[in-house]
Image (cartoon, rainbow, N blue to C red):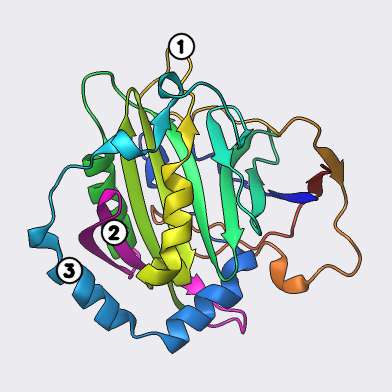
Amino acid sequence: MSLFRRRKNDDDPTEGAEAVGVVESTEALNDADHDADADVDTDGAEADHASSTPARAHTFDRSGGPFDRSEVDGPENRLDLGALWVPLVEGMELQLQMDEGTGQVTGVFVVLGDSAVQVQAFAAPRSEGIWAEVCDEIAAGITEQGGTADPGYGAFGRELLARVPSQQPDGKVGFQPLRFTGVDGPRWLLRAVFHGRAAIEPENARQLEELVAQVVVDRGTEPMGPRELLPLHLPDGAVAGEPPADADPREQIAHDEQPQGYDDLSPYERGPEITERR
């Protein structure tokens, strides 16, 4: 059985020019993020990350993925969610972020152990990529909110290693490590945000990085404005239902943090679950 969990999202990330700069955070990963922040020297990780920057190329070769729809024969061992075809990996849990107002799927979380990655696809101009510009805007937004965002280069080229202000399970405000990556494709931008151990430990990020590299973006032919969220949908055969009574409360949705102009954190309860039986 594959599990799909709906996530509430009161703020539409497709609105306005800052659409791609939204940071989403969930309590489903709070324990992993909290442990990562407590047990790992993030200052050292940031220093290593920054020191590697000058030696890395500023461009990313996309020949090994992520792929455009035109570059593959079909979904194969991938789940078709509309604009994103997500590869299926043993042991993964896939969670869908939903806009409760419109019912639109706005993002995809893949959880593996104590790490996770959020993937979203956005429209981009035909003439040039937008990740470099978006990356700068995300860094500025996080810094304005009292966090840190250190630039570097990783598996997908230019990236940010960030520490974002976040409410911890005990109610105190701490810092959540996040790693922002982006890949420019033909008329699209794929953004992947790594959470938990994968945000700060390269050895724990590799499996999720390999998964992201196998994602396929189906841009479609419809005209869309730059940075507009590409449409996603529920997987075929998904059945909606309420969360089980014995669900782990640590997996409830707690936050939807935005680095652009938020005053405090907005708590959310977990929405209904969606399950697919195979």
Q: Secondary structure at mark 1?
A: loop
Viewport quadrant of the C terminus: top right
Is residue 169 in the magenta section? yes
Callout 2 environment at 10 Å: few (<14), some (14 to 19), or many (20+)?
many
Establish if 110 lies above or below 104.
below
Q: Amino acid at mark 2?
A: Leu
Q: Earlier in the sequence, mark 3 or mark 1?
A: 3
Badge 1 crowding class, 10 Å Cα cut-off, few under 14, some 14 to 19, many 20 or more, is: few
Which comes sooner in the sequence, label 1 or label 2? 2
Label 2 secondary element: strand
Q: Position of residue 252 (x, y in %)?
A: 72, 65
Task: Residue 221: give its label.
Answer: 1
The residue singled out by tag 2 in the image is: 160
Q: Residue at (80%, 37%) from the top-left corner?
A: 238
Name the mark on residue 167: none
198 over 71 or under it: above or below = below
Magenta stretch, overall SS: strand
Q: Are marks 3 and 2 in contact (CB under 8 Å)?
A: no
The segment highlighted magenta reads: 144-172
Horizontally, residue 12 falls left or right of residue 100, namely left
Circle 3 sits on which residue? 50
Q: What crowding class fits label 3: few (fewer than 14 Cα within 10 Å), some (14-19), or many (20 or more)? A: some
In the rendered structure, the answer to whether residue 259 lies left or right of residue 14 reads left
Can residue 15 be spotted in the picture?
A: no
Q: Residue at x 56, y 40 (%)?
A: 86
Query: Considering depth in this image, is 225 or 195 the residue closer to the camera?
Result: 195
Q: CA distance from mark 1 to mark 2?
A: 31 Å
Q: Is residue 232 left or right of residue 65?
A: right
Decide which of 224, 63 is in the foreground and name it.
63
